[in-house]
Amino acid sequence: MEDGKEYTDIIGGHGRFQIAVLVFCFFGAVAHCVQDFTIIFFAPNVDHWCARPKEVLQSNISVEEWKNFSLPVVKSRSGVDEYSRCAVYNISIKNGSLHRQDNADIIQCTSWEYDLSFYKNTIVNEWDLVCDREWLVSMSKTVYMLSYFLSSLINGQLSDRFGRRKVLIFCLSWFLAFVFLTLLSTNIAMFMVFRFLSTFGITSVFVNSTVILAELVSAKYRVIYCLTYKYGWSLGYLLLPLIAWLVPNWFWLHFVVSFPCILLLSVLWIVPETPRWLLIKRKFPELEKLLLYGAKKNGKDLKQAKNQIEDYIAYHSQKIVKEEKATVLDLLRPAVRKNTFILYFSWFINSYIYYALSWNTNDLGGDPYWNFFLCGAVELPEVVLCIFLGKFFGNRRCLFFFQVMAGICLIAMALTPPDIVWLTIVVSMSGKFFSSGVFGLSFVYTPEIFPTVMRNAALGSASACARVGALLSPFIHQMADVTYAWVPIAIPGALCICSGLLVLLLPEMKDKALQDTLQERVELRTQEIPNYRSGIKL
């Protein structure tokens, strides 16, 4: 058997066998996206003001009269005059009318009324997450991302050690258990705990999907598959505002978007262990059975395929391979250290940008449902463009271009006057377009440049670095309050441009086979070094 022959040359690099797994990963991405962003509609910007005392209500004093007479005028974050939402004058009732002395004290609210004409019921009004409790909304997003961080870090290593399929099934079952327990939440603390636990499971389903697809298809179809399944994320993005508009109650919204996730249990029949993991673990009987099944599903001649599979397995079974068990610490080895640090920084800064733009669509002005819909719609052409550019120019060059453009858009956003709403939305959506492209390309490119023994650990730890950036993004308002309004936007934009330039130092993997062992990576690195020194970049 010729050296370098891949199992996809036998069973086919693309066919019904791979498409079935792609469909599962597609709907897994839908579920993950919806779970990611429902918090925007669970805790939107709900107009609120200090509640009218009982005697005021008994006097039939309207909300407008109460606001005009009892609420002090303050500056909003955008510098506009508005009625205070957290304080009220110390007033009294005389003869059924409001009475306020000229030097009346201003006191802090202890209860609130909410404008529920747009949103019927949210966790904001149900648990009074306003004023000095407003930070709890940001904290719930941070807790979610903390779980995302831990899941990416831990489950990536578990998948490399115990197999993609086993960890996928376990994490999906874990997610389904806790996503429904979230409905029992009676306070924000319970809500955050259950969201933390459910996120730990669904994150692994999404992150592992990229590795599973990359190891099932040939190099020719790798970019197409690993970016096409991302359309599931885009579909979830587009469906969520429609569902939230139809179900303006956080409890029932959570139930409606979570119940269909039960269908993901089809993983038991659809998603196999990946041939490459079975090969590197030298589980040859399971590998032979899986490859025969794949050849049958893809319509190959079974007699010819069986002979080729036996030759393939016989060739690899004779190779003396020292079993390698890589951990996150192995990503710091000289052969992969540079790749690791550059990609960690890239994932970190892009994740901050992506979630800062996604979670704050309510601040753009206009209809929040349409803003969120547009935020998802810009990802549709991005996927097509990434597939086209990645196929012809390679993922590394595309990643450089998209990251630099995302940084430029953020700097432009910081310079845009907030009162020009249409321009703010256009620049923000442009930044979202390029940032989403960076995410899609990173999910494809990261597994490409690391060997099989550490591929999931690499992708998982890179995704964990991304969650560190996402941990900061919910506090964009608080950062602006203590610094300047442009700081949380312009500085990450500049760092994003720097990250894009650093990506050019990474190897191009266009049309190259995936590496299986660290030794293969070392050999490839020795081939790259002379080209760096001569100024030629592969």
Image (spheres, rainbow, N blue to C red):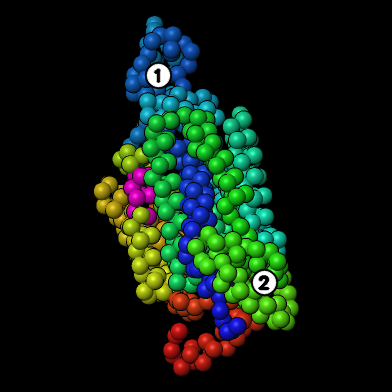
Q: Which mark is residue 61?
A: none
User: Which segment is the magenta one?
Assistant: 371-379
Task: Give the residue number, with chain letter if any, for mark 2.
Answer: 280
In the image, is residue 133 above or below residue 211?
above
Pick whichever, 268 or 460, lies toward us.
268
User: Which quadrant holds the N terminus?
Assistant: bottom right
The secondary structure making up most of the magenta span is helix
Identify which residue is drawn at 47% across, 65% down: 14
Identify which residue is drawn at 64% across, 45% down: 173
User: Which quadrant holds the C terminus?
Assistant: bottom left
The percent position of residue 405, horizontal first and vertical second, equals: 35, 66
Secondary structure category for the residue under label 2: helix
- In the picture provided, is 511 more to the left or to the right than 262? left
Q: Amino acid at mark 1?
A: Arg
Pick whichever, 12 or 180, lies toward us.
12
Give the quadrant of residue 85: top left
Count of marks, rendered view: 2
Q: CA distance from mark 2 to mark 1?
A: 79 Å
Identify which residue is drawn at 55% across, 29% down: 127
Q: Residues within 10 Å of mark 1 (few under 14, many from 20)?
A: some
Does the image show residue 395?
A: yes
Earlier along the polypeptide chain: callout 2 or callout 1? 1
In the image, is residue 2 above or below residue 492?
below
Task: Give the residue number, with chain letter if any, for mark 1.
Answer: 100
Please say whether residue 373 is one of the residues in the magenta stretch: yes
The percent position of residue 100, horizontal first and vertical second, equals: 40, 19
Q: Amino acid at mark 2?
A: Ile
Identify which residue is drawn at 43% across, 30% down: 248
- Observer-side mark, 2 or 1, equals 2
Secondary structure category for the residue under label 1: loop
In the image, is residue 347 above or below residue 24?
below
The percent position of residue 336, horizontal first and vertical second, equals: 60, 77
